[in-house]
Amino acid sequence: MKPLRIVNVHQAKTHLSRLIDDAHAGETILLAKAGKPWARLMPLAPPPPQRIPGRLRSQGPLSNPNALLEPISPAELAEWENGGPVPEAPQP
């Protein structure tokens, strides 16, 4: 892990563009005022992946859509509640 870089506010004003690029690259920079920590310049968290509606449409309709509404067997329910292995989905 990289040591935290401390930059005085005067230096930060002079080199702000470079500091922003460094923060965007993943570095966290501590801004100091009169030698005391004052603020932190750090990268933003990446945005969550965007949901794409209809992405699986090309695979065609479900072969048995009513199966989604059927109750599971008591054996499957017991296995689910006990944290057992999840059965593999049947391959088309």
Image: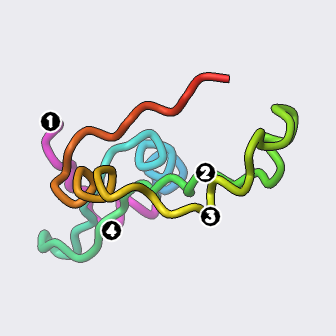
Q: Mark 2 and 4 residues: CB-CB less than 8 Å, in contact?
A: no
**Structural distance between the alpha carbons of marks 3 and 4:** 62 Å
Q: CA distance from mark 1 to mark 3?
A: 50 Å
Q: Secondary structure at mark 3?
A: helix
Callout 4 amino acid? Val
Label 2 – label 4 distance at C-alpha: 35 Å
Q: In the image, is 43 to the left or to the right of 59?
A: left
3 vs 4, front mark: 3
Disc 4 crowd, CA 10 A, few/some/many (<14, 14-19, 20+):
some
Instruction: Tally the numbered discs.
Output: 4
- Image quarter where the N terminus lies is top left
Q: Which residue is mark 4?
A: 9
Above-or-below relation of 3 to 44: above
Secondary structure under tag 2 reads loop
Percent coordinates x, y for residue 64 in the rendering:
74, 45
Question: Tag 4 or tag 3, which sits nearer the N-term?
Answer: 4
Q: Nearer the viewer, residue 52 or 23?
A: 52
Residue 23 horizontal/vertical position (percent)? 41, 49
Secondary element type, mark 1: loop
**Mark 4: secondary structure:** helix
The numbered mark, 2 or 1, whose residue comes first in the sequence reads 1
Which quarter of the picture shows residue 30? bottom left
On residue 1, which mark appears? Answer: 1
Mark 2, residue position: 49
Q: Which residues are magenta?
A: 1-13
Q: Which residue is mark 3?
A: 69
Q: Label 3 sits on what residue type?
A: Leu
Left or right relative to 88: residue 55: right
Q: Nearer the viewer, residue 39 or 57?
A: 57
Q: Is residue 37 above or below residue 26?
A: below
CA gap, disc 4 and disc 1: 24 Å
